Amino acid sequence: MAIDKVKAYFAALGREEDIVEFPTSSATVELAAQAVGCEPARIAKTLSFAVGDRVALVVCAGDARIANPKFKAQFSCKPRMLPAEDAEERIGHAVGGVCPFAVNEGCDVYLDESLRRFEVVYPACGSSNSAIALTPDELAAYTPGSSWVDVCKLPE
């Protein structure tokens, strides 16, 4: 299972015990916020896009939406979500548990600026009932090769 890969990844960093597994689903922003006990905006959702022959994983705040012009300026293409049936094979995590940790080759991770307004955010950990509390700086440190981008818009 993908959560086992993520647990092994965090075990090497001394943080495996910080992964929380919930008795209920955390597969959507709303469900994750209920499970964690936080506002939905603090859920660090990971969106997957096909960009050429690679996958771009954009981790953003739960209340953020992709801004098409910003995405196109960053990636030189229109945003095209990766089909759900391709997620597990290409990313290593199934829809509902997609996260930026322990991903397959061919995935590039981008952290959206929408996350920086929070002290702590909660990304999934490879399953539809898991999360970990991280600061935005920790999130960046635990996703080697990731870079910060500004491709989202916040609700008005």
Image (spheres, grey):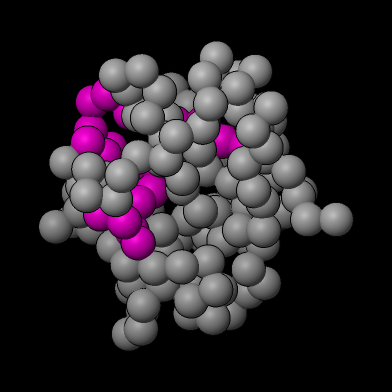
Does 108 appear in magenta?
A: yes
Does 40 appear in magenta?
A: no
Front-most of 7 and 33? 33
**Please, is residue 56 above or below residue 43 in the view?**
above
Residue 47 visible (yes or no)? yes
Front-most of 55 and 124? 55
Q: Which residues are magenta?
A: 90-112
**Please, is residue 124 above or below residue 25 in the view?**
above
Residue 149 percent location from the top left of the image: 63, 27
Residue 63 percent location from the top left of the image: 67, 58
Magenta span: helix, strand or loop, mainly? loop
Residue 73 percent location from the top left of the image: 65, 18
Q: Farthest residue in the bottom direction? A: 23
**Please, is residue 40 above or below residue 106 in the view?**
below
Q: Is residue 1 left or right of residue 99?
A: left
Q: Quadrant of the N terminus?
A: bottom left
Q: Quadrant of the C terminus?
A: bottom right
> Residue at position x 52%, y 43% from top?
59
> Residue at position x 26%, y 45% from top?
87
Front-most of 39 and 13? 39
**Please, is residue 149 above or below residue 44 in the view?**
above
> Residue at position x 16%, y 41% from top?
89
> Residue at position x 46%, y 48% from top?
46
